[in-house]
Amino acid sequence: MNFFLENLWFWFVLAGLAGVIGYVSFANSRKIKTLFGTAAAVVVILALGFGLHFFVDTDQKSISRMLRGLAAAIERDDLNAVQNYIEPSAMKTRGLARAGMAACAVKKARFNDLKVAVSDAGAVPTARVSFTAVFHWTTKQPISGLSVDTPAVELIKFNVELVKDGSSWLVTDKCEFTLRAVP
């Protein structure tokens, strides 16, 4: 079901097929009603596709929205907002976030290549998420004698397990990352 909700190109292909079939039918019958019927069918198919794509929330969209919110909180240097995206019992991840935000100021945070696998098997839904993050950062204070004044760019590959809490997704302690990841 998510395939139809997340892949808008499917609806364009379906509308194109309806258009081709309708045009062939019009070419054979030469009735203007066939042409108008075809146009109506194409419009209905596209409207249905756009409606499903933009107005139905899927786990993929919800997780993507959560990651954009987390990136915005990191850019604002708002530790409390960042902690809101982390599960309360994930003390290791909370500690890493605290230490990282105390040492570095992130000017720009983006993610791409998002892959999501949701599991509803347990009592609480979980998602295995992998993505690549790009951070433009500087140091707030020298770290072991190192001070970065002009923003450095860091590419980090993440493999994270999220847990669903109500309608939101939270980062757990099952968080692996690779610094200087090559896409």
Image (cartoon, rainbow, N blue to C red):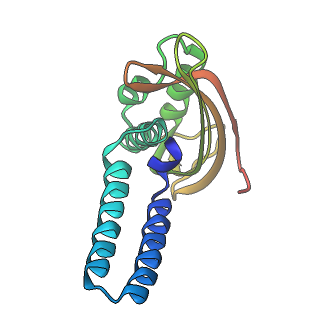
Where residue 91 appears, as percent x and y from the top left, is 56, 14
Q: Nearer the viewer, residue 160 or 22?
A: 22
Q: Is residue 18 left or right of residue 154?
A: left
Residue that appears at 38% across and 51% down: 53
Looking at the rendered image, the quarter that the C terminus falls into is bottom right
User: Which of the 4 quarters of the picture holds residue 23?
Assistant: bottom left
Where residue 12 appears, as percent x and y from the top left, is 45, 67
Number of marks drawn: 0
In the image, residue 39 above or below residue 28: above
Where residue 138 appears, as percent x and y from the top left, is 51, 49
In the image, residue 38 above or below residue 61: below
Q: Nearer the viewer, residue 151 or 115?
A: 115
Where residue 171 appears, as percent x and y from the top left, is 53, 25
Residue that appears at 74% across and 55% down: 182
Q: Is residue 129 left or right of residue 94?
A: right
Q: Nearer the viewer, residue 122 or 156?
A: 122
Q: Is residue 36 left or right of residue 96?
A: left
Q: Residue furthest front?
A: 29
In the image, residue 94 above or below residue 49: above
